Image (cartoon, helix red, strand yellow):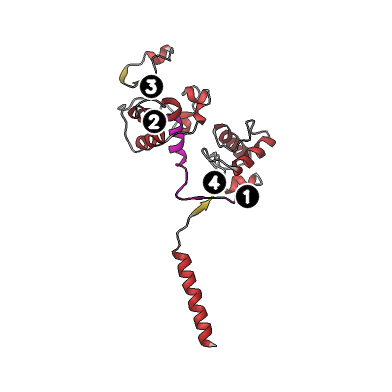
Amino acid sequence: MRKALRAGKLILLALLIVCAALPLTGAQAALRRGSSGDDVAAVQKRLKQWGYYSGAVDGIFGYATERAVRWFQEKNGLAVDGVVGEKTAAAMGLNLKSTVSAATKPASGDVYLLAQCIYSESRGEPYKGQVAVGAVVLNRVKSSAFPNSISGVIYQRGAFSAVDDGQINFTPNDSALKAAKDAMNGWDPTGGCLYYYNPAKTSNRWIRSRPIVLRIGNHVFCK
């Protein structure tokens, strides 16, 4: 009897060791800009029912959904970060049971948002020019004359035409994501510029009065 109990304990111990050694393949789901699927659609549906969201229930977590989430969080005393994590989901009466693989997680919020800005503002431009657009955003974050966050800079009223016309919600391609990461890692082809524009498309007299530092592709960059 004692031998059987001892053997059973050894088997249990071995199982515990094996389980502890297995890699964690999933993480608690959190919905943010760039997420998609049924959970996002459920969030949109709730927000629409309560008057926070007026867009389509399409399961795509874009700018309008993030804005609605922020509004909901602000009104309900939650941390206003635009991310539907455990507390925000609970406040909505939702249980996010899905998990995301560590190997398939989307880029972090700031990198993804910067990539969206790069893609919507400079797709078709040379790769160096795409990095330069990302660098301008980051240079503004560092400047006391602009908001001190990537989202604050990008969504500052009138700052980027892609926000005004909704192109900011387009899904960035691999080039834009790589350019965002390169800019975040310190590559600044502009040498500290805070502005850029396409002379063929811009009639704004103020921006055209800024001293031009360099040109990359169709964009000129200014300080």
Q: The residue under label 4 is which amino acid type?
A: Ala
Q: Residue at x 54, y 41 (%)?
A: 83
Q: 148 or 15, which lies in front?
A: 15
| Residue 149 in view | no
Q: Mark 1 points at which residue?
A: 95
Percent across and percent down for residue 90 are 63, 48
Does the magenta-highlighted stretch encompass residue 101?
A: yes
Q: Residue at x 52, y 23 (%)?
A: 164
Q: The residue under label 2 is which amino acid type?
A: Gly
Of pointers 4 and 1, the one earlier in the residue sequence: 4
Is 159 placed above or below 59 here?
above
Q: Which residue is drawn at 47% across and 43% down?
A: 106
* Disc 1: CA contacts within 10 A as few (<14), some (14-19) or many (>=20): some
Percent across and percent down for residue 35 are 53, 41
Q: Name the residue under label 4.
A: 30
Q: Name the residue under label 3.
A: 196
- SS state under label 4: loop
Q: The residue under label 1 is which amino acid type?
A: Asn
- SS state under label 3: strand
Of pointers 4 and 2, the one earlier in the residue sequence: 4
Residue range of the region highlighted in magenta in the rendering: 95-118
Alpha-carbon distance for marks 1 and 2? 36 Å
